Amino acid sequence: MSEQDSKLLFRKTAHSEVSFPNYLEEEVLRKCAGIPLFISGMADWLREQKEEQLKLPTMLKQFERSLSPAYDDLPHWLKVQLLYVAMFPQGYIFAKSSFTKRLDAEMLTYPSCTEEDYFGELIDRNIITRVKSSSKQSRQAEEEGCHWQVNYFMLHFLASKSAANGFVYTSGTLKNSGDNKPRRLSLHEPDLQLPSLLEEMNLSYTRSLVVSGVVSGIPLDKLIFLKVLDLEGWCCFEEQHWLAICKLFLLRYLSLRKTLVRKLPPKIKDLYKLETLDLSHTQITELPSQMCELAGLRMLDLRGTPVMRLPKQFQKMRQLRHLLLGGNGVDNPNTTVTQVPEEIRYLCDLDTLAVDLSGCSPSLLEALGSIWKLRVLAINCSFHQSTDRKFQETLCSCIEKWEQLEALTIHCEPGCHMEFLSSDILVQTRWLMKFKVTGGRFLNFPRWLSKLDCLAFIEITIEKILQDDLTILGKMRRLECLVLGLHLLPEEAVVIDGEPLFLGLQRLSVRWRVPWMTFMKGAMPMLTHLELKNIGGSPLSEQCVSSGIINLQ
């Protein structure tokens, strides 16, 4: 719910003679994050309390009591996924893929339930919620596919339940656990007693460890049977920790994201069961050739690192499925150019690839055409490449071969024209669900996009738009998100008619010099997010202000 509606629900439900301090109401509403169940539940409880009892710790206890019956009725398979959410630190923004990879590493998924099943359940029950795109942090996270976080009250509830079930212990629940053999540890708050507490425990039973912040005194040498080690944002990481990490022979998931690590030791090859290695946003400059001996590695993330060259032995990693290179994210144009060996053609089972082609040889692009199983591809190209006829022909030839492609992102420098991407090429990718071009632009709306029946996400910039173009876009029945940039100022307002157009559209972002639009009654009935962005700095005149927003239900 919106902030205003949240306040109305809270005050209506909590109609009480007790006068709540303003700071308390604001604190409760902020932590409820607009979820009606949380707002009404907390308001009901507050209504019955005396003013001196209105403390946050007692509120958390009440919230746990309120949610426990609902939790007890959940199916067993969902309880496991639910309790694992307690591993996240407060306010953490994450991607679905990283969550599911950690579950897979601990073998906590069930053959009868798909990834979409249990993740969808967590969303539907408001256990995890989509991050609002207003903050700088969330916008950067969205570029890397991170859209989700756990509500404050829900996280405390899950931490309490997880500790009661002996499933996960956090920094706050470990002291009173009485469990000398913890299975999973999630440590994000520094505590002077923590080192001695861990020293007394039998950590050979621990299978998963998540550490962040300035937590110190972690005895990695005692955690010999770990399967998941997530050190994202751990400020206390030192090179000497590699000695203990390289002896974790059962490790399947390792994340050093946003740590101070600067190099990988050759002994990393001993982690022969490792499947996921996240080195993104570190200061690693090169990869040792021994890393290519990791026969089980499926996912390698090097985004945001100064790695300039992959080792020639990279062709040995034929089991690799996801390879992410470049800058701050798959969808970020400010990338570091990593030279990819042409032997990448031998990684024929590669599923996801993000790569910067700037400065790379033309033969590398041809080599990419051999990876016919690609489903997700993001490429960066220079102005010279995107205007070079030979490069255009080679790229088009490759796209025709990627028949299983589901997401295609092309980053190029401003001013590049993209007309070389024609209907004859893209129609071959009949499963394409996401099409994104940044930097470059089309002269007119590429109407051949309407022939792609599965397309749900479009982000493009065009010179001008016609009313007929909107009609074609509006009839795309699978379209859920549209990010549209317009280079030239329209001569008159762009009119969005009512039904039956844009029946499934949920998110609309318009990025023009002056976003001049008129929404008619009944327009975009499913729209939940609207962004009208003035990208040219032009002053808005009274005649060029968007109108009819009140018609968006």
Image (spheres, rainbow, N blue to C red):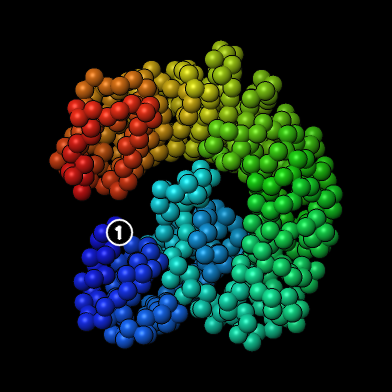
Left or right position of 394 against 22 = right
Asked if 30 appears above or below 445 in the picture, the reply is: below
The image quadrant that residue 222 belongs to is: bottom right
Residue at which label 1 appears: 3
- Name the residue rendered at 63%, 36% in the picture: 326
Position in image of residue 188 (x %, y %): 61, 67
Query: Which residue lies at the image location 64% right of the left edge and 41% below the top edge?
Result: 304
Viewer can see residue 334: yes
Image location of residue 483, percent across then percent down:
38, 35
The answer to whether any part of residue 471 appears in the image is no
Asked which secondary structure carries label 1, the reply is helix
Going by the numbered disc 1, the residue's amino acid type is: Glu
Q: 300 or 14: which is nearer to us?
A: 14
Residue drawn at (23%, 65%) of the image: 8
Q: Quadrant of the N terminus?
A: bottom left
Q: Where residue 54 sits: x, y (%)?
A: 37, 81
Q: For this rendering, which residue is in front, 368 or 486? A: 486
User: Which residue is at 42% across, 82% downward?
Assistant: 58
Image check: 256 left or right of 444? right
**Does residue 90 lie above or below 353 as drawn?**
below
Count of marks, rendered view? 1
Taking the view exactly as shown, the residue that stands out farthest to the top is: 389
**Residue 210 screen position, x and y as percent:** 64, 65
Taking depth in this image into account, of 188 and 86 the one nearest to the observer is 188
Q: Is residue 130 left or right of residue 286?
A: left
- The crowding category of the residue bearing disc 1, from other C-alpha atoms within 10 Å (few below 14, some 14 to 19, many at least 20), is few
Q: Quadrant of residue 388?
A: top right
Up the image or down, 179 lies above or below 275; here it is below
Give 518 or 450, whichever is nearer the viewer: 518
Left or right position of 181 against 39: right
